[in-house]
Structure formats: C-alpha cells, structure tokens
Image: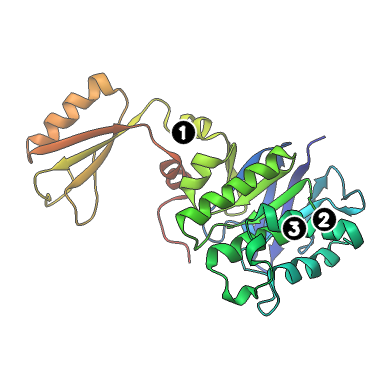
Amino acid sequence: MTPLRVVGARKRFGEVEALAGVSLELRHGELLALLGPNGAGKTTLVRAIVGRVRLDAGQVELAASRVDGRPALGLVPQEVALYPFLSARENLEVIGRFHGLRGSVAHEAVAWALAWSGLEARSAEPVRGFSGGMMRRLNIAAGVLHRPPVVLLDEPTVGVDPQSRERIYEMLAELRRDGSSLLLATHQLEEAEGRCDRVVVLDHGVVVASGTVAELVEQSFGGRRTVRLTLAHEPAAAPDGCRLEPGSRVVHALVEDVVTDLPALVARVASSCEVTDVEVHRPGLGQVFLQLTGKELRE
C-alpha cells in the first residue's frame, strides 16, 4: 500500500479556498518535492496531513497510523522547535517522551539520533549556542526520533551553509535507505531538481503539475531549448522574440529546433548588436515553475 495518499483535499478559510481538490501520493522510499509560490496551499496541505487542519472534504490516507506502538508520521517544521536552554541530549529525551519512547527504547533512539546528526560530541551543550546548521540537524533528528515510515519536512535547509545542507541531505538519504518516505515542502528549486525523485507543483490550491523533472520539462517545453546570448553592450530594448535580463547584456530566447532556428536567431540579434557568446540549455525546473505559476510576486 502507498505510505501516504491525499485524495480530493479541500479547505476554505472564509473567502479563501486554500485547497481546491488536491490529490497526491507519496511512494515507498521516495523523496517527493512539494513546490508552489506563497499562498499556493503548501502549508495548509502539510497541516492537514499531520492533523492540525480539518479538511472540509477529501481525505488523507496513511498506510498505518502507528508502527510498533509509535506514530507512523514524523514532522520537521520550518521553525526550529527546540528548547534553547536544554542540551541536545535533553531536547531529544524530552521530545522522545512526546513520541511515546520510554526506557531502553528511548535511550537507544537518542543515541542513534545524536550519531546520525553528527552531534554526539556536542550533546551536553545547550542548543542556544549551536550554529544554524547544527540546530537544523537537531531539529530534523527530533522530528524523526521515533523512526516513522513517513516524514514531512518543511524547508529543512533554509538559512544553512552549503556544508550543512550536504550533511542534511546525507541524513535524508540514510532515512530513505532505511525505508522512510519523505515529502519535502521547499522553495529551493535547485534542490528539488537535483535531489528529489518526483515533483508536485501546487498553485491556487490545486495540483498544476506532477512527475519527474524530465516529465515536467517535456510537458511544458517539449523539445524546445533555451538560448542565452551575451551581447557586446546592453541593448535599448530586447530584440524580437527575446527576453532581456534587466540591467545586463544578456538576452534569452526559446527555439523549437536548435539546428534550424539557432543560426537565424543569432543572425537576427547580431544585426542590431554584436553577439559575444552563445549558450544552449534544456529548460530546467525553474523555467517550468515560472511557466506554470507565473512571474508575478506573491506576498
């Protein structure tokens, strides 16, 4: 059975329809990215899955509510949910009791979490003195201390340095090897593209696309390619069929066929401004995301 399935989830807050029939599934052992601009419904969906929001319609299906007497669901919130004046070990011991861990089971779980997060040597120190990356790792360890088969993570790498980010993804990879399935709500498109098995894009409370990155690119752009042209000087206006990066000498365009369309594009642009460099790329998740959700700012 699929570890987690959401079917037709609907939720309204007054005049705002936060979820308008969202359906998705988290497969066994996968890392699934949940993307969407501000106000898309990501937070409401995560809260509905963990039971903090009651849906107006639809349902959340977990393969199991408990495993070996422990909750089958783990949550890693975006906000660091730790007690600053307690040590790392004390935080885990307290949170372990919230998860129903007692005695030798709790002791073993805390020892595992400290080793897994690389915090054994700092386990006796108050977490108020930890770096941002250390707090994030401990925050994740606290959320999965009971080793749940399904884990929801809300922006687990926000504000951390590249080394801490790598360590966090090593931790998540170990969870997956042990059989956990992970749903990652994030704004980091590069991480979603490079780390996740599949992507679900939410906008205005509905799923606007889902699939692997390759599938989403194919659905949105087909065989088209992105061309990046660097000009000798900044043009007064973007050449026909191109988009100008504001305040730069770079323009972008999409071509249907590189062999036939690229020479004509370069010649057209070069007729008004010298072209100094040409790059051709397959569109990525960032371009798919903008095409699906638009470019306007969401506050």
Of the image marks 2 and 3, the number of the one nearer the N terminus: 3
Of the image marks 1 and 2, the number of the one nearer the N terminus: 2
| Foreground label between 2 and 3 | 2
Question: Disc number at residue 48?
Answer: 3
| Foreground label between 1 and 2 | 2
Q: Residues within 10 Å of mark 2 (few under 14, many from 20)?
A: few
Q: Where 96 sits versus 284, above or below?
A: below
181 or 83: nearer the viewer? 83
Residue 269, how many percent across, how many down?
A: 13, 36
Of the image marks 3 and 1, the number of the one nearer the N terminus: 3
Residue 244, how many percent across, how many down?
A: 22, 48
Q: Mark 1 falls on what kind of element? A: helix
| Residue type at the position of mark 2 | Glu
| Residue type at the position of mark 3 | Ala
What count of labels does the image hold? Answer: 3
**Is 203 on the left-hand or right-hand side of 44?**
left
Q: Mark 2 falls on what kind of element? A: helix
For the point 62% across and 53% down, the residue is: 205
Q: Is residue 125 visible?
A: yes
For the point 84% across and 42% down, the residue is: 63
Residue 188, how many percent across, how many down?
A: 49, 52
For the point 11% across and 37% down, the residue is: 275
Q: Residues within 10 Å of mark 3 (few under 14, many from 20)?
A: some
| Residue type at the position of mark 1 | Val
Query: Which quarter of the image is occupied by the N terminus?
Result: top right
Residue 215, how many percent across, how many down?
A: 52, 30
Residue beneath disc 1: 217
Q: CA gap, disc 1 to disc 2? A: 45 Å
